[in-house]
Image: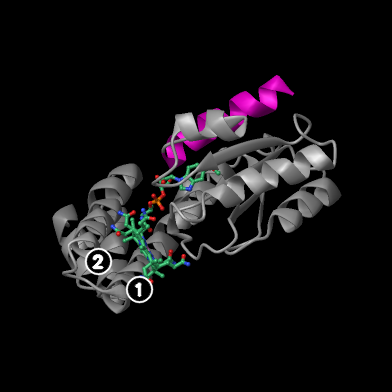
Amino acid sequence: MVNLKEIAENLIQGKAPKVKELVQKAVDEGQDVQKILDEGLLTGMSVVGEKFKRNEFYVPEVLIAARAMKAGMEVLRPLLVERDIKGAGKVVLGTVRGDLHDIGKNLVGMMLEGAGFEIIDLGIDVSPERFVETAREKNADIIGLSALLTTTMPAMKEVISVLEKENLKGKIKVMIGGAPVTQDYADEIGADGYAPDAASAVDKAKELVGEK
Ligand code: B1M
């Protein structure tokens, strides 16, 4: 039986092939997918974050660990999205302008996809105008914004301003999230919803589509 701590350890050390192998093994053994994600990959990534904060890790180490995280997520992706109940709604998703963090955003996308949402993922460093234009063109229900830096959070407010200018506020809902983001911040900028993690993002997205 794979010890999930071993997955976390290898992720911290940035050993992508090993992480992928162990995650695959844990899946094959029938271990719970959510547990593999939480106790293996996410636990490892949170240690990386702590080390980064204490200057024990620098950007290259974090990038290598992020690559290992992605390798593990590749294995879990089909399992997280397989629930596939189509037609829950359409979400334009992305990381806001100036921000290059995409691991959490990708996880949110996978979980939403698993819950039957159609995801249009615009990637990272996305301008407010592009979010709104795409959502309008694709007739999306929700714009999902991710920000990991306190310095990029104001870009979320800009998306809402563009929606207001285009008279789309309320018609296209805005859901926000990311480590520094809070419900208070969502209230402050007039976002329709906030979710602290990927699982709650699914609940919140369903709620927002239901309100329309
Ligand atoms: Co960055 N970084 N980083 N980094 N990085 C943080 C965010 C930081 C907290 C680290 C620290 O100091 N402890 C810090 C921000 C400080 C601040 O603003 N307060 C920081 C910094 C400073 C920086 C740079 C400025 C460093 C530098 O260059 N000096 C730089 C900025 C680059 C830029 O964006 N312009 C930078 C760069 C990087 C890397 C490129 C090296 C890499 C990103 C790789 C990648 O994403 N492809 C990286 C990483 C990996 C991190 C940490 C270590 C981990 C982030 C992560 O992936 N977490 C991070 C420390 C930390 O957060 N502990 C850190 C795992 C992920 C699953 O969680 O993204 O929170 P998270 O997503 C969660 C929830 O937040 C939520 O659900 C997800 C799943 O549960 N969620 C949503 C996220 N989006 C959502 C959207 C929703 C709903 C929920 O609705 C739409």
Numbered disc in front, either 1 or 2: 1
Q: Which residue lies most toward the bottom here? A: 60
- Depth check, front residue: 171 or 158: 158
Q: Position of residue 7 (x, y in %)?
A: 21, 61
Placement of the N terminus among the 4 image quadrants: bottom left
Residue 188 picture location, percent across and down: 55, 31
Q: Position of residue 133 (x, y in %)?
A: 81, 53
Left or right of residue 181: residue 172: right
Residue type at mark 1: give it.
Leu
Residue 69, quarter of the rendered image: bottom left
Please give the name of the residue rendered at 76% of the width and 33% of the height, measured from the top-left corner. 169
Instruction: Give the residue pinned by disc 2.
Output: 11
Residue 63 has which mark? Answer: 1
Residue at (40% x, 66% y) in the render: 70
> Which is more N-terminal, label 2 or label 1?
2
Does 63 sit above or below residue 35?
below
Ligand 1 picture quarter:
bottom left
Is residue 205 part of the magenta span, yes or no? yes
At 43% from the left edge and 55% from the top edge, which residue is drawn?
149
Q: Is residue 98 above or below residue 86?
A: below
**What span is colored magenta in the figure?**
197-212
Q: Residue at x 17, y 62 (%)?
A: 54
Amino acid at the residue labelled 2 = Leu
CB at mark 1 closer than 8 A to ligand 1?
yes
